[in-house]
Image (tube, rainbow, N blue to C red):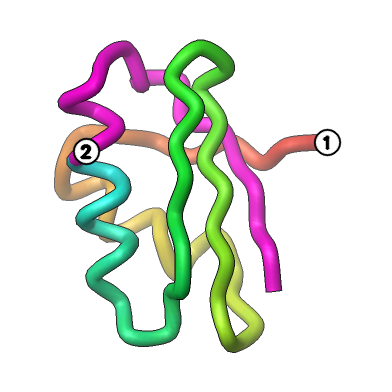
Amino acid sequence: MELKFKVPEISCGHCKQTIESTIGSLDYVQKVDVDIENKLVSVDSNQVVDLSDFEKLLDDHGYTIEPTE
């Protein structure tokens, strides 16, 4: 399953690395890609996930999630 969402606080490579490593640490996540310019995160997983699965993890690092269209 692929899930995409925006993280308005993304501004640099450190943000990219933090988000990719945090979400990527979950067993069911296969791939995480962060697009700094568009503030977009794409997650591929081997199970159905909901944005709330990632909200708490990223909130602990000061990031918020906005659903995409």
Q: CA distance from mark 1 to mark 2?
A: 25 Å
Q: Which residue is mark 1?
A: 69
- Residue 28 place in picture, x, y as percent: 43, 84
Q: Are marks 1 and 2 in contact (CB under 8 Å)?
A: no
Numbered disc 2: secondary structure: helix
Work out which quarter of the rendered image holds the C terminus and state it: top right
Give the number of the disc on residue 51: none
Could you classify mark 2 by the number of other residues whose Cα lies within 10 Å: few (under 14), some (14-19), or many (20 or more)? few
Q: Which residue is mark 2?
A: 17
Q: Quadrant of residue 6?
A: top right
- Residue 30 place in picture, x, y as percent: 46, 73
In primary-sequence order, the first of circles 1 and 2 is 2
**Amino acid type, mark 1:** Glu
Q: Is residue 40 above or below residue 65?
A: above
Residues shaded magenta: 1-17
Residue pictured at 30% horizontal, 76% vertical: 26
Q: Is residue 30 left or right of residue 1?
A: left
Work out which quarter of the rendered image holds the N terminus and state it: bottom right
Q: Is residue 67 above or below residue 31?
A: above
**Amino acid type, mark 2:** Gln
Q: Residue furthest right?
A: 69
User: Is 65 a magenta residue?
Assistant: no
- Residue 57 place in picture, x, y as percent: 26, 58
Could you classify mark 1 by the number of other residues whose Cα lies within 10 Å: few (under 14), some (14-19), or many (20 or more)? few
Residue pictured at 39% horizontal, 54% vertical: 55
Q: Is residue 63 above or below residue 27?
A: above
Q: Is residue 58 left or right of residue 30?
A: left
Q: Is residue 37 left or right of residue 11?
A: right
- Residue 43 place in picture, x, y as percent: 54, 58
Q: Quadrant of residue 62?
A: top left
Total marks in image: 2
Numbered disc 1: secondary structure: loop
